[in-house]
Amino acid sequence: MSARRGSGYAGGRRRRPGCLMLLILAVLGIVIVLLLWYLLAGRLNVPGPQPTKPPRPNSQPASCPDVQLLAIPGTWESSSTDDPHNPTANPASLMLNVTKPVRAKFPESRVDVYTVPYVAQFSNPIAFPPDGQQSYNNSRSEGTQRATDELTRMSKQCPLTNYVIAGFSQGAVIAGDIAEQIGNGSGPVSADQVLGVTLIADGRRAGGPGQATEIGQTPDGVGAEVTLKGISVPGITMTGPRSGFGELAGRTFTICAPGDLICTAPPDAMNPVNMIPSLLKLVNAAGNPVHSLYNSFAVDQDGTTATHWTAGWAEGLIANAPHPPHA
């Protein structure tokens, strides 16, 4: 007997348009969730090239320091509301071992020690429930904007002030990115006003021409962002190596301890095809013992630690910096 027209049968099987619609709605739901995940986690949004600097005057206001030391703390070592001239968000912040000795050695008229306040977090992208932290992209974007804004403000108000820049971990990535812009003529201050840059545990560490000079031994591997170049998941964008520090290449230094996966990631160990485990290694590396011990990590045979070297380097630059005329 032939099947009746309009009976809902075809080839002996019932059509189920409702199932197809449910499948379409489920796919749309997943797409919407992923889009919201990306949007809420945040895109990397750092300042672009800065405008050309105006001609410098012959003198600057009496309130201006001769030098500004711009320090950028690492992950979990700052907050958006911290006091840049008296940071207390994390009393164990590594950069305090650099900034405190410098502040104690010079009067405020000689150096303004400014610690960039930013959220300084790195959320686990697959934590469930969410861990409540800001994403790496949001944190890095805020830190870069805050640091750039301060350099821009100081340059405008005190056009003859010179700069020393130093950062640790996520702060080293931010400091290095700004130094790259400055050295290539598109930063918030002129390259000839930057006395030097030091990056401790830089996630974009790479060797080669135009890159930073290693202090101490040169461990194998590269920065985790170099290994994971091109990976982008909600809230985490890996930007690869920098193009080079341009005019600042000879004045930029990097310190990296062997075994610190933030700056010594094996180039072939974190396969981008296996994105989530690779990113989890990066998240967890921020809390590993090697990464947290730069205050005791020796960079020479005399036992000079990374932070002691950085403080002494900054003090030397400041002591020998020009004394701009003041009005």
Image (spheres, grey):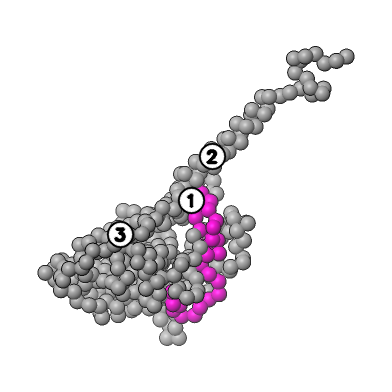
Instruction: Identify the amino acid type marked 2.
Output: Val
Which residue is denoted by mark 1 in the rendering? Answer: 235
Residue 15 rendering spot, x and y as whole percentages? 73, 23
Judging from the image, what secondary structure is the residue with disc 3 in?
A: loop
Taking the image as shown, residue 294 lies to the left or right of residue 33, namely left
Task: Residue 11: say if magenta.
Answer: no
Task: Examine the rendered structure and indicate whether residue 279 appears above or below residue 252.
Answer: above
Instruction: Identify the amino acid type marked 3.
Output: Pro
Which one is earlier in the sequence, the residue at label 1 or at label 3? 3
- Near-viewer residue (225 or 245): 245
Q: Distance between the residues labelled 2 and 1?
A: 14 Å
- Near-viewer residue (292 or 275): 275
Q: Do the residues under discs 1 and 3 have CB atoms within 8 angstroms?
A: no
Asked if residue 89 shows in the view, the reply is no
Q: Residue 51 carries which label?
A: 3
Q: Residue at the location (11% across, 69% down)?
A: 327
Which one is earlier in the sequence, the residue at label 3 or at label 2? 2
Which one is earlier in the sequence, the residue at label 2 or at label 1? 2
Range of magenta residues: 212-238
- Near-viewer residue (177 or 298): 177
Residue furthest out toward the bottom:
301
Residue 310 rendering spot, x and y as whole percentages? 36, 75
Task: Residue 236: say if magenta.
Answer: yes
- Near-viewer residue (13 or 292): 13
Residue 67 rendering spot, x and y as whole percentages? 24, 71
Which residue is denoted by mark 2 in the rendering? Answer: 33
Q: Residue at the location (50% across, 74% down)?
A: 207
Task: Examine the rendered structure and indicate whether residue 319 appears above or below residue 275.
Answer: below
